[in-house]
């Protein structure tokens, strides 16, 4: 097969060896002569998958005692509601940092339960930076933020210092770098970036922080009902969880989060330095807040758009068109994208400069 | 590979040709040299999958104009809440028929929104029959029932006649027989029986019936928000939807719901007649309410349990142990289970009689 350099923003590139095993399990899983798709989620074989997946999350992120890991459905979009239901008493106050579309949607869901103090926002500059220097109200029940903005290409480089509990939507950078789980009461993340395929969402929650809102939480939105049933309150999304497990095994085998953080830093440095060096390109976010996952940039001369589009397509590069709300280009460099693929893009940019410089 | 006769109650058997194609798409989808798992859900190739899947549901079930088909996440368990949120005004009244665990859970979720009149129940006989002769209150906003009970093995043979709108959880018998969609304001069903693998849930909803509750519905639970975005309000569960599409293509190619209904009737007749004929076995539900999907039965002499378990296991039969709340055996005969597999089980039962009769 021709090698495609897959820069998709999510669902995104997964390692070839993971895809190979994932493909095999669809016809014959664990030598059962049955597909993974047609066995009971209560079977020994699948319960083992679920437990392995939960353990790998704990091991790779160094999840401390007292935290639970769940694989649920609904994406981070349902997570916005789940976070608010489980941590915000009806009518209570929560502090949200608004760094774009996803933060904005999270705020809307929290407003159904209580009051949201939007304590910082980068909306004034189309979310092209990460706000700083904000105060966090002590009477808020928690601080919520989105660690990485896939659309605009910004990323928190540090966890905000907070005296109140912190909740983070890490959908697009979980497992891409070291984090200190103890800094958070709740982390949630849709799988379809660095964890696995679309269709499951991981929750990492401090168990002692739950059950304190007095809310009458619907069963499927109540993290405690899922914890009680070991993440099998109802039939789980079997296949997305299995592929996530394979992908986390791949990450562990290669050196874990320490290793991938270095690789991700190298990839980002390579691409951003070319964006900054090459006069035909320009980054569109504040340099200090640039995302290691999603690099956004534009052509300095828009009339060259068609030509550049032809050039990268000819190099088997896929998925670098920018999001419709930003325009330009977005190169997503998730864990499974190799450094060589970034080099291919950088080479295309250099060649493009030679022709048009 | 040794042929396994897969009677799993769900996730359940899928056709071999579906599994083969589903496996291939994980390594190379549509000759893109990319996995289906690593492309954007907004790509032309996946949008086509989503639209095909929605169209096949419409075609196979004869869905009339004015209805929308959605593929969402969360299983029927989230459907319990979605049904209530979208059709029951806060404090309003709804009528529920209780035929077991799933109805019971549906009732609990509706009670968070309004008042539930449990108008009929078979709890008095451990849900071994389908109630009849009940009245439906005219002031209720809708009637809710579960068409097939997988745990106890009962099934509604007709849609209840109702002057108020009807909502049905068809998780375990959708696509197994003809239905008249116009009888319902909402049908919802987890995929993992006759539609596809676990991880998606189909909603078939009369659009004009929505938006009338005055409820402030969270975005992910609001069927109108999903309709507005063509079932892509957020990243959909790509793979479960793709495999469902393949499975619905298989059903269409073989003759659709008319065809499978005949096959399912044959399979059920074959097994139930053996259960009734063979003195070593006994059905545990009312004969008139027996499910064509899940046949439950017990040994008349419990001391033979170990021997019978060995016999069916030796015949490569899988997944016929009864649910823990019922005991005995449960043979689930979903669409993809061939008549030959039922014959194998019946032969084991006949041989067992010869040895022990």
Image (cartoon, coloured by chain):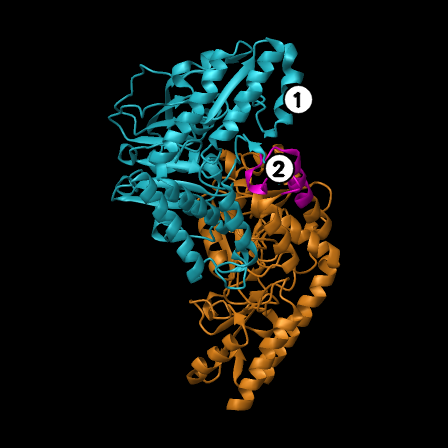
Chain colours: A cyan, B orange
Quadrant of the rendered structure where residue A129 is? top left
Q: Residue at the location (54% across, 45% down)? A: B83
Up-down: is A332 above or below A328?
below
Quadrant of the rendered structure where residue A298 is? top right
* Mark before the other along the chain sequence, 1 or 2: 2
Which element type, helix, strand or loop, lies under badge 2? loop
Give the quadrant of the N terminus of chain A: top right
Question: Is residue B45 highlighted in magenta?
Answer: yes
**Dot 1: chain letter:** A
Which element type, helix, strand or loop, lies under badge 1? helix
Query: From the viewer's perspective, is B108 left or right of A144?
Result: right
Please state which of residues A266 and A88 is positioned toward the viewer in this rendering: A266
Please state which of residues B325 and A336 is positioned toward the viewer in this rendering: A336
Q: CA distance from mark 1 to mark 2?
A: 17 Å
The location of residue A46, given as percent across then percent down, is 44, 57
The location of residue A259, given as percent across then percent down, is 36, 35
User: In this picture, which residue range is highlighted in magenta?
Assistant: B29-54
Query: From the viewer's perspective, is B43 left or right of B320?
Result: right
The location of residue A199, given as percent across then percent down, is 51, 43
Question: Is residue B262 highlighted in magenta?
Answer: no
Is there any visible trace of residue B165 in the rendered image?
no
Q: Nearer the viewer, mark 1 or mark 2?
A: 2
Q: Residue at the location (47% across, 30% down)? A: A339
Residue indicated by mark 1 = A310
Q: Which mark is residue A2?
A: 2
Q: Are marks 1 and 2 on the same chain?
A: yes
The location of residue A200, given as percent across then percent down, is 47, 43
Q: Which mark is residue B329?
A: none
Is there any visible trace of residue B101 in the rendered image?
yes
**Dot 2: chain letter:** A
Quadrant of the rendered structure where residue B161 is? bottom right
Give the quadrant of the C terminus of chain A: top right
């Amino acid at each position: 097969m021709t090698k495609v350099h897959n820069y998709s923003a999510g669902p995104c590139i997964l390692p070839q060896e993971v895809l190979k095993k994932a493909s095999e399990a669809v016809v014959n899983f664990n030598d059962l002569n049955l597909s993974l798709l047609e066995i009971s989620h209560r079977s020994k074989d699948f319960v083992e998958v679920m437990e392995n997946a939960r353990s790998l999350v704990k091991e790779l992120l160094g999840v401390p005692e007292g935290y639970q890991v769940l694989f649920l459905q609904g994406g981070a979009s349902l997570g916005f509601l789940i976070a608010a239901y489980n941590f915000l008493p009806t009518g209570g106050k929560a502090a949200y940092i608004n760094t774009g579309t996803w933060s904005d949607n999270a705020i809307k869901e929290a407003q159904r339960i209580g009051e949201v103090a939007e304590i910082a926002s980068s909306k004034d500059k189309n979310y092209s930076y990460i706000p700083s220097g904000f105060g966090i109200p002590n009477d808020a029940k928690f601080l919520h933020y989105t660690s990485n903005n896939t659309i605009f290409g910004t990323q928190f480089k540090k966890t905000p210092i907070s005296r109140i509990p912190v909740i983070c939507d890490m959908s697009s950078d979980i497992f891409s770098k070291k984090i200190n789980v103890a800094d958070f009461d709740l982390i949630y993340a849709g799988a379809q970036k660095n964890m696995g395929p679309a269709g499951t969402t991981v929750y990492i929650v401090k168990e002692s922080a739950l059950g304190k809102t007095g809310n009458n939480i619907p069963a499927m939105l109540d993290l405690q009902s899922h914890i009680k049933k070991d993440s099998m309150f109802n039939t789980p999304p079997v296949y997305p969880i299995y592929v996530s497990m394979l992908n986390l095994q791949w990450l562990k085998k290669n050196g874990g989060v320490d290793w991938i953080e270095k690789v991700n830093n190298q990839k980002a440095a390579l691409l951003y330095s070319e964006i900054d060096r090459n006069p035909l390109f320009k980054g569109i976010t504040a340099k200090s807040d640039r995302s290691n996952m999603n690099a956004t940039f534009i052509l300095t001369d828009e009339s060259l758009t068609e030509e550049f589009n032809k050039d990268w397509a000819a190099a088997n590069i896929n998925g670098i068109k920018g999001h419709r709300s930003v325009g330009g280009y977005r190169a997503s460099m998730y864990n499974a994208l190799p450094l060589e693929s970034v080099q291919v893009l950088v080479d295309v940019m250099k060649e493009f400069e030679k022709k048009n410089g």
